[in-house]
Amino acid sequence: MDDLLPVPARVFVAGHRGLAGSAVARHLTARGYEVLTRPRERLDLRDATATGAYLRAERPDAVVLAAARVGGIMANSTRPVDFLEDNLAIQLSVIAGAHRAGLRRLLFLGSSCIYPRHTAQPITEDALLTGPLEPTNEAYAIAKIAGLLQIRAYRRQYGSSFVSAMPTNLYGPGDNFDLATSHVLPALIRRCHEAKEAGHADLTLWGTGTPRREFLHVDDLAAACEVLLRHYDGDDPVNVGCGEDLTIAELAALVAEAVGYRGRISFDPAKPDGTPRKLLDIGRIRSLGWSPAVPLADGIAGTYQAWRTQAAPR
């Protein structure tokens, strides 16, 4: 198998403070790559001029575009302009800037929310643009689809060795636990923790509890990113997931077990569920020799302990 990015190589990780980006930076550093980073205070990736100048000056061997505005159902529903415009601006700046700087490799991280709300499960990469999107995160999904198509366009027009990955729901150390903007798993961890600390006998969660979701530890995503940088060079995106899903009710039970919450969990069906099911077909990434390594129960426990150590209220 061709090695498109041999060690040692210089890799700019855009979004290195985020959940995915921080994991990618840790993994690549441990594997012997020279990882370049730039905090937002020194480089706003929405600024195309500044981003292009940085990439021309540093000329890394590859870029991992993990920077994005992300959030859960509430944040996506109430701030669609932010999710659309910030993500479009970041993607245009970094992808176009990498091309103009003459960079050879770029990996764009999208999201499984690019796929239609109702589609065959597990979802294959060719399901893209075959049906309507989930309304609660449509703006974010449209932005990510635009990034994927931008990657494809640069490949076709200029022969760029740029590729895309579509991760499933991610979790792990460094996740966002702000209840106003977080995704479902860190929100569940915090809700269960606070209910336990307060001695609440009942905990009510959003939705019906019946939607099915797939979860991937960020350390597994980071390993997949290295595999894609080294061995994949195709027009189509590559799904990255664990190949298994569970209901939100089952996830809540796992989280309660990890946190030690013994109260009753119920659901409020008046609140939105989001997409009914979202399980990725990961045959393409498996064919490159990658497979997930972190069991969900272990990953949840580790994420909870990391949050307690770093940021949980005392």
Image: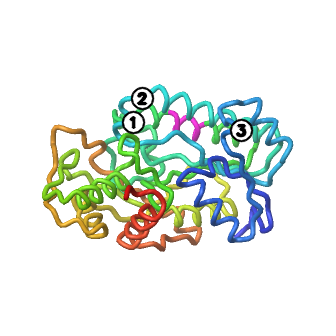
Expressed as whole percent of the image width and height from the top left, the position of residue 179 reads: 35, 45
Crowding at dot 2, Cα within 10 Å, few <14 / some 14-19 / many 20+, comes out as: some
Tell me the tag on residue 79.
2
Tell me the tag on residue 290.
none
Crowding at dot 3, Cα within 10 Å, few <14 / some 14-19 / many 20+, comes out as: some
Residue 146 on the magenta segment: yes
Question: What amino acid type should be assigned to the residue bearing mark 3?
Answer: Leu
Expressed as whole percent of the image width and height from the top left, the position of residue 66 reads: 60, 48
Counting residues from the start of the chain, the first of labels 1 and 3 encountered is 3
**Which type of secondary structure does the marked residue at label 2 adopt?**
loop
Magenta segment's dominant SS is helix
Residue 227 on the magenta segment: no
**Which type of secondary structure does the marked residue at label 3 adopt?**
loop
Expressed as whole percent of the image width and height from the top left, the position of residue 299 reads: 42, 69
The residue where tag 1 is placed is 75
| Above or below for 12 versus 250 | above
**Image: magenta residue range:** 143-149
Relative depth, front residue between 163 and 271: 271
Question: What amino acid type should be assigned to the residue bearing mark 2?
Answer: Arg
Q: Are marks 2 and 1 in contact (CB under 8 Å)?
A: yes
Give the quarter of the image for residue 233.
bottom right
Q: Residue at x 63, y 41 (%)?
A: 152
Tell me the tag on residue 43.
3
Q: CA distance from mark 1 to mark 3?
A: 24 Å
Crowding at dot 1, Cα within 10 Å, few <14 / some 14-19 / many 20+, comes out as: some
How is the protein colored in the picture? rainbow
